[in-house]
Amino acid sequence: MSSIPDPNRRPNMQQIANVAGVSKSAVSLALRNDPRIPESTRFRIQKIAEKMGYRRNPVVDSLMTQLRADRQPTFQANLGLINCSPTKDLKENHTFRRLREGVIRRAEQLGYGVEEFWLQQPDMRPERLKQIIETRGIRGLILMAALDPDTIDESYSKIWYNFSCSVIGVTHLKNQLNCSSNDQYLTTRHATEKILELGYQRPLMMIPANDDALLEDEFSSGFYSVTRRLAKKQQLDLFDLNISDLSAALAAIKKHKPDVILTNKIELFAAMIESGLRVPEDVGVVHIDWHDGIPHLAGMRQNNRVVGSAGVDLVVGQLQKNESGALEFPQVVHVESAWIDGPSVRKGARVKF
């Protein structure tokens, strides 16, 4: 049986390990309170270390923390990020920008590089893209921002099945590929539940009907799943918002007298203010795709970086299992959004026009 070492000498981890009957690495983890060591074992090791007079060296601790932070994962391979949108620079759109950031950050964490391709590039053709990908040894693809089926040559779909592949964000690619996206049904459901909690009683959703159709009616379904609890006279139908003719939306607000509006278009808020409507005194406004650029609004922040990260995990999981091609049962990862308080909503009863 191990004995307690000389109390006049500072004990090291190996001596603590000998007394505790565990490995030196277990002592190291326990003293850092690492959850990989059971709580009871951590506590026992920490008590033994304390009794033996062990003291952590702050200089060594600082150095080891830095070394762990600087440690890079072994390079695995490159992944291809395929931009299917009409816009080349993904940084111009806050959603695409965050999806891209999530992809690149997660890929780096797992030891993968990312090469980016734009399908709308003038000289890009399916055969050329396939040749480039194969020449560069890229085995995994992540497809992003396919908002309109008419913008993608159908012959591209033959390429995706040659690789491990996932789709992130909104897409019209009807295929058998793994997918990660924001859960828009829960986004609008939670937003609507929140405004009812705040005291609003007559909500109106104003979004382009095409946006809802892109998501197979997830926006409207989430909204109606909550408003059906209201009295019949308080239930308002989704308004098809046309941002090129906002006068129709303003007329609808005056006619239907909602006390709060849910929308995904900042242009509507600007038109309301310009028309003389007071927000939130006359009517509240909730943006269901909130981001840092609109701090004057309340809304739902969609976790696009997490969506991008999940897309990488899906592809890497396939690579590790040597999977490619069409999947019989594709995985779908839905990421929830978070409510963000803002000055565009208030508590209390609706103010009538």
Image: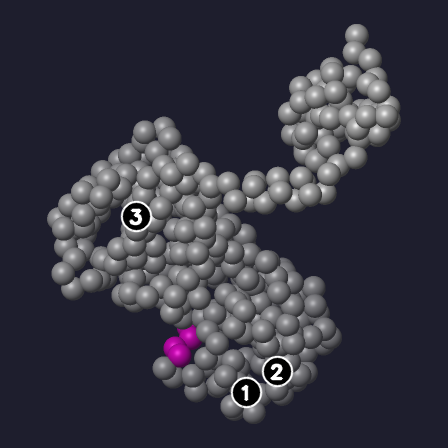
What residue span does the magenta drawing correspond to?
Answer: 239-243
Name the side, left or right, on which 35 lies relative to 277: right
Q: Which mark is residue 273?
A: 1
Helix, strand, or loop for circle 2?
A: loop
Residue for badge 2 = 279
Q: Please state the horizontal and vertical placement of residue 24, each as a whole percent of the image.
A: 67, 22
Helix, strand, or loop for circle 3?
A: strand
Disc 2 to disc 1, how far (Cα)? 7 Å
Q: Nearer the viewer, residue 347 or 54?
A: 54
Please state which of the two labelled residues, at mark 3 or mark 2, is closer to the viewer. 3
Residue 157 shows up from this direction: yes
Disc 3 to disc 2, how far (Cα)? 44 Å
Please state which of the two labelled residues, at mark 1 or mark 3, is closer to the viewer. 3
User: Circles 2 and 1: CB distance less than 8 Å?
Assistant: yes
Could you tell me which quadrant the N terminus lies in? top right
Could you tell me which quadrant the C terminus lies in? bottom right
Helix, strand, or loop for circle 1?
A: helix
Q: Residues within 10 Å of mark 3 (few under 14, many from 20)?
A: many
Magenta stretch: dominant SS?
Answer: loop
The image quadrant that residue 225 belongs to is: bottom right
